[in-house]
């Protein structure tokens, strides 16, 4: 069965922006995406070992391992600054709307400004496709495709990835105040920025903006996953330039969702939230390495808040 595909913008379908599913693909319904309903006779209990107390070196190592970045001591981490407009393609409308709602919720609780639903051009595209790798290879054959706007090293890394998810971001370097830094058209040179403009040893004169984020997921690999899991996984791959996790990480993360041998969180974990909050709540022009060191403290705060909330709920009449 070939799936009808289009791009959802908060309830608006724009047809013809994604490839059809491969021939012979099994049909699926909303129930296949949302998961099984619990019944008195058939319930499933999922348990996992609790995360250890956050330790600075171990948290920092995990943060570094999932982050795509260049020189972590002299370059900032990429993040969204423009109004975010999420779009979902390749799923039934009802499911796509649920995922868009969750993506918007995640972005808003991180402090991102959202574009008006239904009236914006998507800059965060989550596509459920037949083969993300095949789509990327076709894009590379076309002159002027989105992939031409990322570095050669990133393109090579994308094609080396053998898993069911392929994610990339188009970024632009700007001054700390948001002015684009444009190279000389004739010589391809980047103008010099006043490195003393920040008046700090910790702040950089530039920031790195995500102009467009794309996450492609092979649709036949999402069997048994919930809307919340898929949206939260896309949040970690699309709002930040991250890598998937293979196997069990020291601290739970939604980034291992597509590893069949791992225990999968049902939503963003304390590690994931701490990572994203650190990325978006600290100044954009801080070196990546400086942000790595603050995730552990953020995890402790989240764990403490969670414990207090749990205690308050248990004491409630």
Image (cartoon, helix red, strand yellow):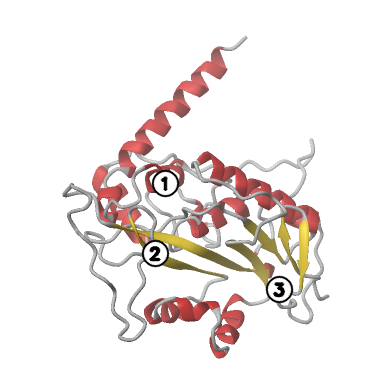
- First in sequence, mark 1 or 3: give its number: 3
- First in sequence, mark 1 or 2: give its number: 2
Label 3 SS = loop
The label shown at residue 251 is none
Q: Is residue 241 left or right of residue 56?
A: right
Q: Is residue 160 left or right of residue 289?
A: right
Label 2 SS = loop
- State the residue in front, 82 or 52: 82
Q: Is residue 91 left or right of residue 161?
A: right
> On the image, numbered disc 3 is attached to which residue?
17
The label shown at residue 180 is 2
Question: Residue placed at 77% from the left, 75% from the top?
Answer: 25
Question: Residue placed at 33% from the left, 44% from the top?
Answer: 295
Quadrant occupied by the N terminus: bottom right
Question: Residue placed at 49% from the left, 42% from the top?
Answer: 110
Question: Residue placed at 64% from the left, 61% from the top?
Answer: 121
- Is there a contact, CB below 8 Å, between mark 1 and mark 3? no
Q: Nearer the viewer, mark 3 or mark 2?
A: 2
From mark 1 to mark 3, how far is it between C-alphas?
A: 30 Å
> On the image, numbered disc 1 is attached to which residue?
280
Residue that extends furthest to the top in the rendered view of this protein: 317
Q: Nearer the viewer, mark 1 or mark 2?
A: 2
- State the residue in front, 101 or 52: 101
| Rendered location of residue 61, percent (x, y) | 29, 54
From mark 3 to mark 2, how far is it between C-alphas?
A: 29 Å
């Amino acid at each position: 069965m070939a799936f009808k595909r289009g791009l959802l913008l908060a309830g608006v379908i724009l047809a013809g922006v994604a490839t059809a599913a491969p021939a012979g693909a099994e049909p699926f319904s909303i129930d296949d995406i949302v998961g099984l309903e619990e019944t008195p006779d058939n319930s499933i209990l999922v348990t996992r070992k609790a995360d250890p107390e956050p330790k600075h070196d171990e948290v920092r190592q995990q943060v570094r391992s999932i982050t795509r970045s260049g020189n972590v001591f002299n370059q900032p981490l990429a993040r969204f600054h423009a109004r975010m407009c999420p779009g979902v393609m390749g799923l039934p409308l009802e499911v796509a709307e649920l995922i868009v709602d969750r993506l918007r919720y995640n972005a808003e609780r991180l402090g991102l400004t959202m574009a008006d639903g239904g009236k914006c051009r998507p800059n965060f595209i989550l596509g459920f496709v037949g083969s993300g790798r095949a789509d990327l290879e076709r894009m590379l054959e076309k002159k002027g495709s989105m992939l031409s706007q990322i570095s050669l090293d990133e393109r090579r890394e994308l094609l080396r990835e053998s898993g069911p998810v392929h994610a990339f971001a188009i970024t632009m370097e700007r001054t700390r105040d948001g002015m684009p830094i444009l190279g000389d058209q004739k010589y391809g040179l980047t103008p010099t920025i006043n490195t003393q403009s920040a008046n700090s040893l910790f702040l950089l004169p530039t920031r790195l903006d995500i102009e467009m984020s794309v996450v492609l997921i092979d649709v036949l690999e999402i069997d048994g996953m919930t809307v919340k899991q898929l949206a939260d996984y896309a949040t970690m791959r699309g709002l930040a330039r991250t890598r998937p996790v293979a196997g069990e990480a020291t601290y739970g993360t939604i980034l291992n969702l597509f590893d069949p041998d791992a225990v999968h969180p049902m939503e963003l974990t304390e590690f994931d939230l701490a990572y994203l909050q650190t990325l978006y709540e600290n100044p954009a022009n801080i070196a990546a390495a400086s942000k790595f060191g603050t995730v552990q403290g953020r995890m402790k705060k989240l764990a403490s808040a969670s414990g207090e909330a749990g205690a308050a709920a248990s004491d409630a009449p």
